[in-house]
Image (cartoon, rainbow, N blue to C red):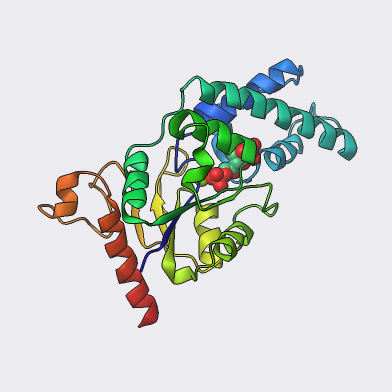
Amino acid sequence: MLSAILWDVDGTLAETERDGHRVAFNEAFEALAVPWRWDEEHYGALLQIAGGRERLLHDMQHQPRAPQNAAEREALAERLHSLKNDYYARIVASGALPLRPGVRELMNDCVRDGVRMAIVTTTSRVNVGALLAPHLGADWESAFAVVVTAQESPRKKPDPQAYQLALQRLRLPTESVLAIEDSPAGVAAACAAGVPVLVTCSYYFPSPPVRGWVAVGPSLGNCAGWQPAIASGSAAAAADRVALGQIQEWHAQAMARRAG
Ligand code: XBP
Ligand code: MG
């Protein structure tokens, strides 16, 4: 039985990267007179590195005008990252980053049917609150049984730490939960923790990993393009979004395969 949905944040709950974090990083570069900017394409490549501070440090290795000394780089990354989070909070507070289609509806399904929810992300806690408060209200945390962020889990995805911690805090076995992820690193983290995972492809991660998922598709807000396919004419297809009932069916099938 599916007892909890574990939500990834960036790319899964909302398309936060291109018009959120990336823009905020560039504003931080500008504010601290750092002589480079991240365009959409370069930022896409940098998303291989999970964690904003880690991403900055990785990129500095290839920026000829970055400080040469490791301690100076660390200090600059720290300042940039903290400033980036302030700018990011301003962007999300303006309502510029909506929840992805079908996300809110699936959350409502979970509340209605008593399926618990958790946040499992490698982003900073402050960014999760900044994103969710405008959509779910100031007490957004009460919607989630467990919230695991970079604060609680410093080892970033694809490390399974965040998922292991969430399972521990939920006191649930892997077979009773399902993660929703968009990135290969997120899928790898869930798989390494033994957590079944559903993939919603995103702007920067348009193609699904070859294996490891229970179901994969372009959007929770649409029944087209999913594997396993949603039968046209079925009750699930009539809803024209991926509802909890459909997810429970995929989950049950995957767990039966695992047991057999
Ligand atoms: C996404 C990330 C984060 C964000 C930036 O994590 O890798 O680093 O890009 O956030 P997820 P921070 O998909 O697991 O939510 O600057 O707070 O790291
Ligand atoms: Mg993600």
Residue 77 at least partly seen: yes
Q: How many marks?
A: 0
Kindly tell me whether residue 17 is visible in this rendering.
no
Residue 5's place in the image compared with 52, above or below, is below
Q: Quadrant of the N terminus?
A: bottom left
- The residue sitting at 72% across, 30% down in the picture is 82
Q: Residue furthest bottom?
A: 260
Q: Is residue 258 above or below residue 75?
A: below
Q: From the top left corner, tell me how far across and down residue 232 is, in percent.
A: 13, 52
Q: Depth check: 66 or 233 in front?
A: 233
The quadrant of the rendering that contains the C terminus is bottom left
Quarter of the figure with residue 89: top right
Q: Residue at point 66% right, 38% down? A: 52
Of 53 and 244, nearer the camera is 244
Image coordinates of residue 169 in percent, x first then y, are 58, 61
Q: Residue at x 23, y 57 (%)?
A: 229
Residue 72 lies, in percent from the top left, at 88, 33
Position of 220 with respect to 230 (left or right) is: right
Query: Looking at the image, is 90 positioned above or below residue 114?
Result: above
Residue situated in front as seen by the camera: 256 or 184: 256
Q: Is residue 102 left or right of residue 208?
A: left
Picture quadrant where residue 192 is located: bottom right
Tell which residue pokes out farthest to the left in this image.
233
Where is residue 186? Give x, y as percent: 53, 53
**Picture residue at 85% right of the left edge, 30% below the top:** 67
